[in-house]
Image (spheres, rainbow, N blue to C red):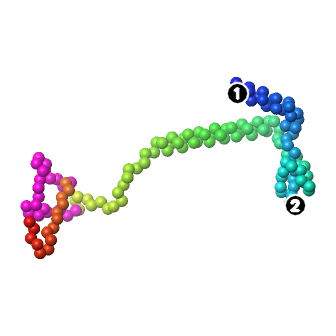
Amino acid sequence: MKRALVATLWAVSVAMTGTSALAGPTVYRCGPDRNVYSQLPCTDGEAVDARDGRTAKQRADAEAAAHRQAEVGSKMEQDRLAREAAIRPSSAMNLAPVAHAASAPKASPAKGKTKKAKGHKATDDDLRIIVPAAKGKPAK
């Protein structure tokens, strides 16, 4: 339906403008170096043939190649998005050096200062905090 509407509108526009739509607009080459192009005539300008010199088959082949390239590009984008969605970001990491339990010196608790929770046995993984006594003052 949409294609038929576009074709009809194009046919009407060609019929209304005559052959000028097929010939293309007049382009003028202007400037002292002749490197300025304009659709408006200039004093020192000359008309340039700006029509497409390709045959209908060459235009159709070029359009087909552009369509294939667009399809390949779309497929590549879909593949890239799928790969990016499949990648799971790595977990946050601590870059500080890790002290291993086997190489860490074992801290001994001060006498009478350890309190154990009821029903819990201390393991090497438990956190132990030891506060040394101040110099010259006996520990309470």
Given the image, on which type of amino acid does mark 2 rest?
Answer: Pro
Residue at coordinates 11% horizontally, 53% vertically from top-left? 116
Q: Name the magenta segment's main secondary structure.
A: loop
Q: Give the SS element for disc 1.
A: helix
- Residue 87: x and y in percent read 45, 45
Residue at coordinates 89% horizontally, 50% vertically from top-left? 41
- Residue 12: x and y in percent read 82, 29
Q: Which mark is residue 2?
A: 1
Nearer to me, 27 or 96? 27
Nearer to me, 47 or 38? 38
Image height check: is 105 above or below 58? Answer: below
Was residue 63 drawn as part of the magenta stretch in this picture?
no
Name the residue carrying label 2.
32
Q: Give the SS element for disc 2.
A: loop
Residue at coordinates 50% horizontally, 43% vertically from top-left? 83
Report how far apart the C-alphas of labels 2 and 1 lie in the structure: 48 Å
Q: Residue furthest top?
A: 1
Q: Which residues are magenta?
A: 104-125
**Image side of residue 22 versus residue 4, left or right:** right
